[in-house]
Image: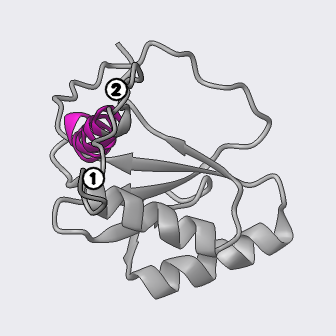
Amino acid sequence: MISGISRRKRRKLKSEINVVPYIDVMLVLLIIFMVTAPLLTLSFEVDLPSSTAKALESKQDPVIVSVRNDGQLSLKLPEAKEPQAMDAGTLQAQLGALASQDRELRVIVAADKAVAYEKVVAAMDVIKAAKIEKVGLATDAR
């Protein structure tokens, strides 16, 4: 025999399961679900109901902030007969003055159902900037 030739060693069979491909598949599925889950809840129809809730009893009438279709804001004080149209800065200043006199001041936002939601939220931002905590939305009680 030649000394340079060596015997081939037999390899033993491994009886283990290689889990690396399964982990790769699971990570891909996780990424797919993480990306698609938020997209499933973004678009849905909203049909808001009318309210049959009774008005809260209070010793004091609320201040009413009205929002028109064009975004014009108006303020109706409890003792006033007609609402007074004003811009957002003036409304904030008036509401701030009223809130500094009365911490329990209640403000109701009244908007036509055709008014864009963005305009109602803008009106509520003005009310919040005036540091008024009790804000409600007027609805058509049926």
Q: Residue at x 42, y 23 (%)?
A: 16
Q: Residue at x 54, y 59 (%)?
A: 80
Above/below status of 21 relative to 110: above
The C terminus - image quarter: top left
- Per the image, is 108 magenta? no
Assess whether mark 1 and mark 2 are in contact (beta carbons under 8 angstroms): no
Is 31 positioned to the left or the right of 103 in the image? left
Q: Residue at x 15, y 46 (%)?
A: 114
Q: Type of residue at label 2?
A: Asp
Mark in front: 2 vs 1: 1
Residue 52 in percent (x, y) is at 44, 12
Dominant secondary structure (helix, strand or loop) of the stretch shown in magenta: helix
Residue 89 in percent (x, y) is at 48, 87
**What residue is disc 1 on?**
117
Asked if residue 67 can be seen in this view, the reply is no
Is 34 positioned to the left or the right of 55 in the image? left
Q: Nearer the viewer, residue 82 or 3?
A: 3
* Quarter of the view holding residue 40: top left
Specify the segment rendered in magenta: 21-41
- Per the image, is 40 magenta? yes
**What residue is disc 2 on?**
140
Q: Type of residue at label 1?
A: Tyr
Residue 88 in percent (x, y) is at 43, 80
Asked if residue 115 can be seen in this view, the reply is yes
Q: Earlier in the sequence, mark 2 or mark 1?
A: 1
* Quarter of the view holding residue 136: top right
